[in-house]
Amino acid sequence: MADAAKEQVTEKAAVGSVNLADLASKAEDQGQIMEVRHPGTGEVLRFDDGRPYTITLVGKDSDRFIELQRKIQDRRAQAMMRSRQPLLAIMSEKDEIDLLVNSTLSWDVMFGDNGSSKATAENYRRAYSSTRWLRRQVDEFIGNAANFFKAT
């Protein structure tokens, strides 16, 4: 039993103390780069010159994400109170895409027939609307807080 207690103390010492104020910084507002991966193989997608396709994103705990999420929730509640009708799935999907577009700060990808894609909200919306696997990757990335905090 003494050995188990000793291991716990050693494990706690290895982790160290964390100042919660340091974790309260706006890390998720800064944006982090996600490398786009092939949905079947998991390999990073790359341009002909070797650089990876990337999307710079803020996290779900960012002020930017939360502000739009609150607006969407308020709009939904008001609409339901007025019409007494349930939320349609198509509206929910549109709102989810709006949140992803709002979370996208920039990208460096090739999307569509023209061989490149400018970093615009319209292009983000088109990509997330038509490419479900990309939408899922972005949603998973912004939902993982560890992507926005550096290990100490």
Image (cartoon, helix red, strand yellow):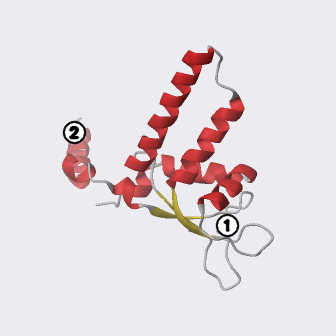
Residue drawn at 38 percent across, 55 percent down = 29
Left or right of 40 in this view: 33: left
Q: Where residue 51 sits in the image (x, y, percent)?
A: 61, 80
Please tell me whether mark 2 sits on a helix, a strand or a loop.
Answer: helix
**Kind of residue at disc 2:** Ala
Q: Residue at the far bottom: name it.
A: 49
Residue at 55%, 46% in the rendered image: 99
Q: Quadrant of residue 85?
A: top right
Q: Tell me the quadrant of the picture where the C terminus can be found.
A: bottom left
Q: Which mark is residue 43?
A: 1
Q: Going by the picture, which residue comes out furthest to the front? A: 82
Give percent across and percent down for residue 120: 60, 64
Tag 2 residue:
5
Q: Nearer the viewer, residue 74 or 38?
A: 74
Q: Amino acid at mark 1?
A: Glu
Spatial distance from mark 1 to mark 2, Cα to Cα?
43 Å
- Closer to the eye: label 1 or 2: 1
SS of the residue under disc 1:
loop
Does residue 15 appear in this view? Answer: yes
Question: Residue 49's spot in the image, x, y percent?
Answer: 66, 86
- The earlier-in-sequence mark between 1 and 2 is 2
Q: Is residue 106 above or below residue 24?
A: below
Q: Is residue 62 visible?
A: no
Label annotation for residue 107 = none
Which one is in front, 100 or 45?
100
